[in-house]
Amino acid sequence: MRKLIFVPILLTLALFQACSEAPFNEKFRLALETAKPGDIIEVPEGIHSFKRSLVLNTDGVTIRGVGINRSILSFKGQITGAEGLSVNASDFVIEDLAIEDTIGDALKVNEGNNIIIRRVRTEWTNGPDVKNGAYGIYPVQTTQTLVEESVAIGASDAGIYIGQSQQVIVRNCRAEFNVAGIEIENTIHADVYNNIATRNTGGILVFNMPQIPQRGHSTRVYDNDVFENNTENFATPGSAVSGVPKGSGILINSNDKVEIFNNRIRDNDTANIVISSYFSANYAGQRDLAKEFDPYPEDIFIYGNALSGGGTAPGRDYLVMVRDAVYGQQGALPDIIWDGVVNPENTDNPQVICVEQDDVDLLSIDAANEFANPSVDMQRHNCKVPKLSPVELGVD
């Protein structure tokens, strides 16, 4: 009888010991799969390697490392999965860790409410490469989202991308060597401030894509340092950002109610600020248009920025042609360029683009007429629009 009892006990002890001695990656995957609301899943110091995507589907979970360069989830040997970590949950916090070298997106948070991404680094350690994953930090269809004190490096689309969301703050982050450093797309009410965007193809983008039902508006971009975003575009050919000219500081496309103020923007080779309509995008005419899509940027207010340098090496041939025609081959495009395309039903609206900046020119490149008559008319842009209210979040 003792043997019949003793053997199961030994087996149980052996299984327990094997579980307790299992590699961290197995423990971590199990913790995600069996998580309950209120759980705090800790990531110790070290490089923890994974071959498959990780998934969390439970609300109210915190994933916490010990430092942005100390707790590292490495997917260098990943063989399956579309992301590194995919989160489909609300009331989610992730902080103090890094996600490196994923096949696809590094951190995707889908359809969640009350999201905090704090002190997270996403990086492709081989540098800019079309084979890198598209997005680093990637909340989509979320509400009440805070991204702060995070770093995004090497994404072949956007380092920090907020899409189809509402009530968003991106602050105190750094984005470099991405195609788009920080991108706000089809999002309503976003504040982007105190960030550094440098050595990307484009520094900070505020876009509306034509096929997405939610029409984004009301974004404030302020108190950022946006400089030397002159990396060659390495996006997948045909993707939306593959048309972003290298050397774009802040780029607005087809979005309304955007405030750009109190930024320090310099030495972006195409222009420090670029404003364009859907009709100047590389995907114009190639995608379905949502019923509510408005292709024209309107109610853009630019004021109080420190602008300098840039414009000397435009990132598209047609922009070089415009530069040469207006300013000469040794000249430079001005701080702000606009494709000049306006809604034919709204041609007299003085509030399409308002500029309150001393000694700053805005060049309309007349894209609708094949750049026949590029011009500067600052009187046309001497206007104001009502300032937007700050975004207030219920998370901190």
Image: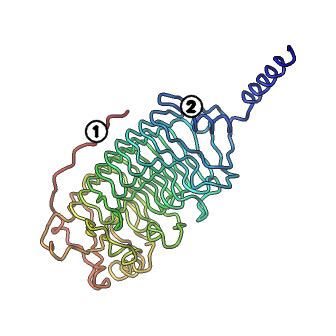
Closest to the observer: 202 or 322? 202
User: Spatial distance from mark 1 to mark 2, Cα to Cα?
Assistant: 28 Å
Image quadrant where residue 265 sits: bottom left
Callout 2: SS: strand
Give the x, y percent position of residue 287: 39, 73
Question: At numbered mark 1, what does the secondary structure look like: helix, strand or loop?
Answer: loop
Picture quarter with the N terminus: top right
Q: Residue at x 26, y 74 (%)?
A: 340
Query: Callout 2: few (<14), some (14-19), or many (20+) C-alpha neighbours within 10 Å?
Result: some
Location of residue 71 (image quadrant): top right
Q: Position of residue 195 (x, y in %)?
A: 41, 46
Q: Residues within 10 Å of mark 1 (few under 14, many from 20)?
A: few
Q: Position of residue 390 (x, y in %)?
A: 25, 42
Q: Amino acid at mark 2?
A: Ile
Q: Relative to 297, is 26 on the left or the right?
A: right
The amino acid type of the residue labelled 1 equals: Glu
Per the image, the residue denoted by label 2 is: 41
Instruction: Out of 350 and 333, give the one closest to the viewer.
Output: 350
Q: Nearer the viewer, residue 83 or 159?
A: 83
Q: Is residue 252 placed above or below 148 in the rendered structure?
A: below
Can you identify the residue that label 1 sits on?
392
Give how far across and how far down residue 291 sits, in percent: 27, 68
